[in-house]
Every structure is written in structure tokens, then in C-alpha cells.
Image (cartoon, grey):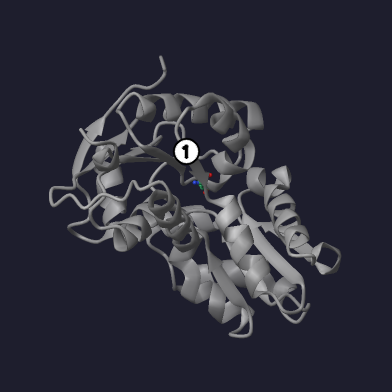
Amino acid sequence: MKEKDKPIGIFDSGVGGLTVVKEITRHLPNESIIYLGDTARVPYGIKSPETVIKYSRQNAKFLKEKGIKLLVVACNTSSAVSLPILRDEIDIPVIGVIEPGARAAVRCTKTGRIGVIGTEATVKSGAYEKAILQGARGKGQGARLEVIAKPCPLFVPLAEEGWFENEVAEMTAEIYLKSFKGNGVDVLVLGCTHYPLLKKTIQKTVGNGVILIDSAEETAREVEGLLKEKGLISNSESAVKDFYVTDNPERFSKVGKVFLGENGLGRLSIVDISSY
Ligand code: DGL
């Protein structure tokens, strides 16, 4: 198979990375995709960095052995704690979701106060702050930026349940996000795979003056840019999507439809990756 027609490998702790699959497919409809959702071990967001690194390595190895041309770490938590390690260990390009989101935030802010919401592990890692401040320094703006990060763990089960805009979602958003109102934050990074699904509720809560950054969309742009640069864009008419999960394909398929729509999921198989 020609290098450019090899699939893109994407992994997440579970179903949330399908927001990234959706955006990549929208930007690059002729790309084949192999997706791995580690549904047996989700959530990663409340685990230690050591455990998330161990799981991420196994996920990456599984996908690498499938003959992928590019690895996308769709999970913010994995990106936050394991990206440099994966880049070191794997001999294909590896893209995470933190850097694209951070770059967009730096581009969009006018007040210099950037909010970041994510899982506990992502916020604790400080990865977004680091990427935002690094990006800003590159543009000579480092000194004037401030990052305010907050974990919003309950947004994950709400998204999985399909509760995007009901009272519970609104109350939860109000409690988590009230500190972002009127504090000068003009950009809020949705630093978790699931949060784009609650975009409307989050926007309503923080007000229209705050720009929401969807990491999934930014990552898809980065993937497109990188493939173009390397001459690896596929124009195959027979692109396929293969999905793997480590547990409960029935639930993945049900929740997956919330993310990708009725016809979005391709072939779905269960896999044991504990020996990778
Ligand atoms: N995929 C995770 C992330 O983006 C959210 C779910 C989890 O905690 O595993 O951080």
C-alpha cells in the first residue's frame, strides 16, 4: 500500500475521541481511520500520570502495528501526560490535542486572560498552561498572558448520557463556570474530548463575549497541515473506518451515534490490548 493511503490511527480513553474523528473526516474525507477507544479502562482523567502513560503506550503500540501513517492522540488527558514519551518512542508523526488548542487560544485572546477546562489529570499536569505560554512567547506575548484552569469532571458523564442542554447540564455548567464570568477571560479552551458536545450550554453560561476553542476542530486542521506538508494526503475513493474497543462494543455503538450520527460508525471489533 502507498504510504499516503495508509490509515490515520486515533486513540482515546473511550468514546470521546469520536469528536476528533468527526472533524478529521470533515476536513479529510478520503482518509482511512483506525480508532481505538479504551472503553475497559476509561476514565483516564482521574488516574495517575504513570497509569495514563502505561495505557497510552499500549494504545499507541496496537495502532502502530496496524500500519498507520500518523498517530493522533485524541484524548486530552493522554496528550497532557504522555505525548513527549510517545513522540520519543514511535517513528511516525504523533499529534496531540493540546498544542493545536493552545495555539488557537493565543491567536484569539485580546485580554490575555485564557480559561482552560479539562479533566482533573489534564488540569493538574499544567500542560495547557505550558503550551499556551510557550506559544505566546514565540509570538513575543508571553509576559501578558494569564491562564486560569479548572477541572469540570461531571461534563464527561453528562456528555455520555446525551444530556447536553437540559437543566442538569445548565446547573452543572453554572457551578463550574461561574468564576469565568466577568473576570476578563475572553477565550475558553474546551480541553477535554467530551466538552464540545456541551458547547451550547457552556456558551450560554459564560456569555457570547467568550470565544470557545474546540480542540477537535483545531487538531483536524493540524492533521491536514501536517499531511499536506509531508505529501501524505490520500485521495483514495475507498477510505474505510475501523473502530476497536477494549470492552462493551454495544455501549460504544450506542453512545458513538450521539457523537457521529446514525451512519458514522464503521466496522467495530473488540480487542485485548493488555499484552501490548
Ligand atoms: N478523553 C478524556 C479527555 O479528553 C476524557 C474522558 C476520560 O477521563 O478518560 O481528557
State the image coordinates of residue 219 (x, y, percent, origin top left): 48, 56
Q: 193 or 213: nearer the eye?
A: 213
Q: Amino acid at mark 1?
A: Pro
Left or right of 8, for residue 265 = left
| Residue at the image point whose x is 45% and y is 50% from the top | 226
- Picture quarter with the N terminus: top left
Q: Quadrant of residue 142?
A: bottom right
Q: Is residue 95 at all visible to an observer of this figure?
A: yes
State the image coordinates of residue 107 (x, y, percent, origin top left): 64, 70
Left or right of 181, for residue 54 = left
State the image coordinates of residue 91 (x, y, percent, origin top left): 47, 28
Find the residue positioned furthest to the left: 238
Left or right of 104, for residue 236 = left
| Residue identified by numbered label 1 | 93
State the image coordinates of residue 96 (x, y, percent, origin top left): 53, 46
In the displayed structure, 19 sits above or below 77; it is below
In the displayed structure, 191 sits above or below 44; it is below
